[in-house]
Amino acid sequence: MKQFLFFVQKEFYHLLRDRRTLFILFGMPLMQILIFGFALTNEVKNTRIAILDNSRDEATAGIIHQLEASRYFDIVKNIRGYGELEPAFREGKVKLAVVFPPRFQYTLLHENSASVQLIADATDPNVANTLANYATAIIMDYQKSMKGQQDFPYTINTEMRMLYNPQLKGSYNFVPGVMAMVLMLVCAMMTSISIVREKEMGTMEIILVSPIMPIRVVIAKMVPYFLLSGVNIASILLLSVFVLDVPIQGNLVLLVSECLLFTVTVLALGLLISSVTDSQQVAMLISLMGLFLPTIMLSGFMFPVENMPIPLQIVSNIVPAKWFYYIVKNIMIKGLGFGYVWKETLVLTGMTVFFMLVSIKKFKIRLE
Amino acid sequence: MNDDHAISVSQLTKRFGSFTAVDAITFNVKRGEIFGFLGANGAGKTTAMRMLCGLSFPTSGQATIAGFDLYRDAEKIKKNIGYMSQKFSLYEDLTIRENIRFYGGIYGLTDKQIKSKTDFMVDHLHLENQVDNLVKSLPLGWKQKLSFSVAMLHHPKIVFLDEPTGGVDPVTRREFWTMIYEAAHEGTTVFVTTHYMDEAEYCDRVSIMVDGRVDALDTPLELKRKFNAPSMEEVFIQLARKAKRSDN
């Protein structure tokens, strides 16, 4: 046991003396959460729009007021005629224009239906779509409030509900993704590098000649990165709750346990990598290409798995991060309990055990 | 088994596929002896030594190290040997004190033993001002002397030195050999490989490997007489010229 503690202490020296790496390991999760949270959101905020109001009545004023009040839109231009529309788009001053026909309120009240034209800059079709949807939702809202005042015998209900994310916050789904990425990097890459470095330096030979058991060497190497991951998980969760206002809907203990399980999975992966290579560069390359990229591309965090071609969907099943992402998303954002994620947890546990067994077996062969 | 033998090797063989790196070598090393293990590059020295240290599994043959069987008592052997590899093997980002503490720790020394060992080494190697500096700031010669002292930390019965003086200046080499003599004097068996023929002269007995076999084994004096050579260098060249396999 004491041997083991000496070893762990030594690992901490390595970790703490390498200030730059340490800074990256602690700084990276913070940076990623903040960048994804504030800069890279798909969410529409303060989009500049133009209004062409050919009616100028109570109803249009009401809708315009609601558009203005929402934090999605900023009305930057009131246009007087169709001629001014295109230049505004071409100069990129606005992304969306809302056009009211003449006698809008009159038509609405007498014919029971009126239309509003939404013109969007579709150079980015996704954004255009989102903008049009938001604007429609706001107009529908107004329509409903109008109908509430007067007692119509029949109303057409267009209900639009945003499940789990009613305010359409973009920050929700990336938190589990960042968590998977950071753990991949900290655990798999750093563990494999730290073991391979000893091989490269020649110190591994000395350790293998010494009476310390190889399994203890391996575990001692993992301890610092396991603790580091714990700190990273905590800081990511704290940041998402207190800075990004992404609440933890589910059970915190369950969430943390799942995170720790995934940490062990990736530690085992790191060990596996270190047993197949003798050079730090190769270890780093394998971690990046073999683990990090699939984590980003195939876990469902950047691109929904359902939209992938079938072969890729099948491949995505062997990416541990996919399962982790699913579990964390469900616990953290949907607030589901263990009953809903036990199958995924089982898969992840199975993977962990498999990687552990293979890597420990491989590690032993190397000594003899 | 003879109690006077620290190492006893019989028909030890290592094959990698069809290539026989070590070909049925047989020899004994006496307790307290300084045993020179010579051979050209690729003759199989390092492979043989790695087998004796438990880093590599023999294909066939027997060996007894410090009284323990190579196959059955690998763990006991580990406690009784020290090893210094060709590569520099201390941690550069640890201080001298931390390196000593770490290696002492994994050999199961107590805190008290580690402390007294550290004090002894600092005093012996004149490291008073450097003991809390990172190892990477030390010159190579000192690093090698330190590596040797660390390999001797747990008072091993046998210490294996794989080209310990490669790239070291003559003065430091001489100092290094003084340390080897001191270790041998205290009863440690020294098993050393080297390419420096003057160092071969310092050994009690020398074996020379050619193409995976031990072709000669005797005291330097006797070898020179047998091969009718003025120096160990001449002996070595005569033997190495017979080698059929090249560097790789």
Image: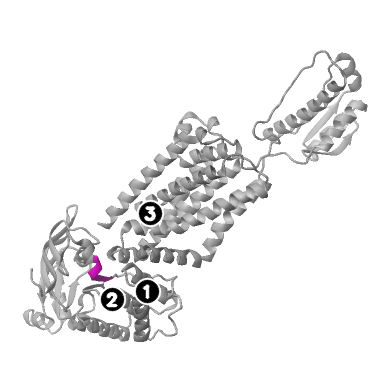
Residue A105 against residue B199 in the figure, above or below:
above
Which residue is tagged 1?
B111
Say which residue appears at 40% left-offset and 70% top-offset: B91
Q: Is residue A350 magenta?
A: no
Spatial CA distance of label 3 from label 1 is 32 Å
What's the residue type where badge 1 is placed? Asp
Rendered location of residue A79, percent (x, y): 88, 34
Which residue is tagged 3?
A274
In the structure shown, which secondary structural element does the residue marked by tag 1 occupy? helix
Disc marking residue B152: 2
Say which residue appears at 19% left-offset and 61% top-offset: B73
Q: Is residue B81 magenta?
A: yes
Say which residue appears at 81% left-offset and 32% top-offset: A97
Is the residue marked by circle 3 packed among few (<14), some (14-19), or many (20+) residues within 10 Å? Answer: many
Disc marking residue B196: none
Residue B193 against residue B20 in the figure, above or below:
below
Spatial CA distance of label 3 from label 2 is 30 Å
Q: Nearer the viewer, residue A86 or A2?
A: A2
Chain letter of mark 1 equals: B
Marks 3 and 1 belong to one chain: no
